[in-house]
Amino acid sequence: MFDEIRPYNDEETKAATGRIASSEMIKPVSEFLYPGRDVSVLREQLKSVKSVDDFQDKVMSQVIDSVVARTTDGLTFSGLEYFKEPSTGKIRHFLLLSNHRDIVLDSAFIQIIFFHNHLPLSEIAVGDNLMMNSFVEDIIRSNRMIKVIRSENPREVYLSSKVLSDYIRRRISALSTETDEPNGLHSDSCGASVWIAHRNGRTKDGYDLTEQGVLKMLDMSGKSGFIENFEEMEIMPVSVSYEFEPCDLLKAEELWVRRDKGAYKKRENEDLVSIMQGIMQQKGRVHIEFCKPVTTEELTDAASHDKNERFRRLAEIVDERIVAAYRLWPNNFIASAMLTGKKSKEYTAEEEKRFVEHIDGELKNVPSEMKDIVPALKEILLEIYAAPVRRVFNI
């Protein structure tokens, strides 16, 4: 039932990492992650992997640590206390309903936080559009990632959404997912937290808004009423804040096209370009807040509304948590001041200089066919960075 979407189990991961090691595509990955080191070192690491946990320990933890060290000015977090029962220390599993700013790093940074704090890693829901070839699919599904099947066919969307919802509910509730396939999961049979973006695709304009469609998908597998169904899902909103927005110029270009043309069509390999740019780009400081889980009282409040309104109210509850926990950086206040002309005490002259240099540097990379719209792109970039300030202060 879940074979098409589930992460690889231990045996499949062992086979997959062997294929990854033998691929020619591993060479540029090694050159970026470990400059000056022969690719054979990474190949041997991959060939020595025996299980899902082994892959995280020997390879992925080092990869993510390298990205943090080389492309950020520090990764901070809070809220890990929610993952253990205060009286017993028992691990709790949650649906990590997160705002979404970078294709892979939002969840990757969460994983490395769990890894270094000795908490079980979560599973991660990702669109199958990212599994653009077998090499990438092997990496993704060895990384506890769940395939979210995209389709333009309404019936296929409905059926795949139902399977995904059932899988997520079973993992969080620690119910068996192996009834229909004895080898259906990796060795962790005690359930797991699951990360999923609160919307379809990354936030491009800086406004983090939960889509009701995601909540309706999660509810599809429920066997009880609205309150009980979402109590079982254990929703924990997660707020991810980057000082320098990953792929900010690419986002600005897409927003301009949408405003000018009314629609945007992805270029060939655009997702891969965004993944690599997000990883390599300097991100400044990064903060992740694991927010207070949604309570029964809040679910009861949402359930008191009419059928469609209850999902809108639940989305508002999640958004309120994410917005309240969002870490506002000097860049956000500087962009707001540049747009409004109202100076703020929330940043220094040096921080302003740094941000202006970043924006100017990004605009130098505008494709030649878009040079005439640089002023419009600059304004959009500033709007992206100012949006969280407007959201937090409701202006």
Image (spheres, rainbow, N blue to C red):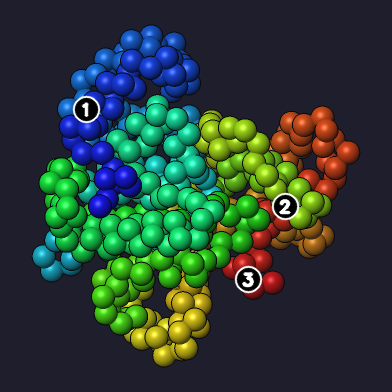
Q: How far apart are marks 3 and 1 (CA)?
A: 49 Å
For disc 3, the marked residue is 393
Mark 3 residue crowding within 10 angstroms, few (<14) / some (14–19) / many (20+): few
Amino acid residing under circle 1: Lys
The first of marks 3 and 1 along the sequence is 1
The residue pinned by badge 1 equals 14
For label 2, the SS is: loop
Q: Are marks 3 and 1 in contact (CB under 8 Å)?
A: no
Decide: few, some or many residues near mark 1? Use Cα within 10 Å; few <14, some 14-19, many ≥20.
Answer: many
Q: Which residue lies furthest to the right in this view?
A: 372
Apparent side of residue 378 relative to residue 157 in the rendered image (left or right): right
Q: Residue at x 45, y 30 (%)?
A: 133
Q: Is 89 on the left or on the right of 22, as rendered? A: left
| Residue named by callout 2 | 263
Three-letter residue code for mark 2 = Ala
Q: Classify mark 1: helix, strand or loop.
A: helix
Look at the numbered disc 3 and give the secondary structure of its residue. loop
The Cα–Cα distance between marks 1 and 2, rounded to whole angstroms, is 42 Å
Residue type at tag 3: Phe
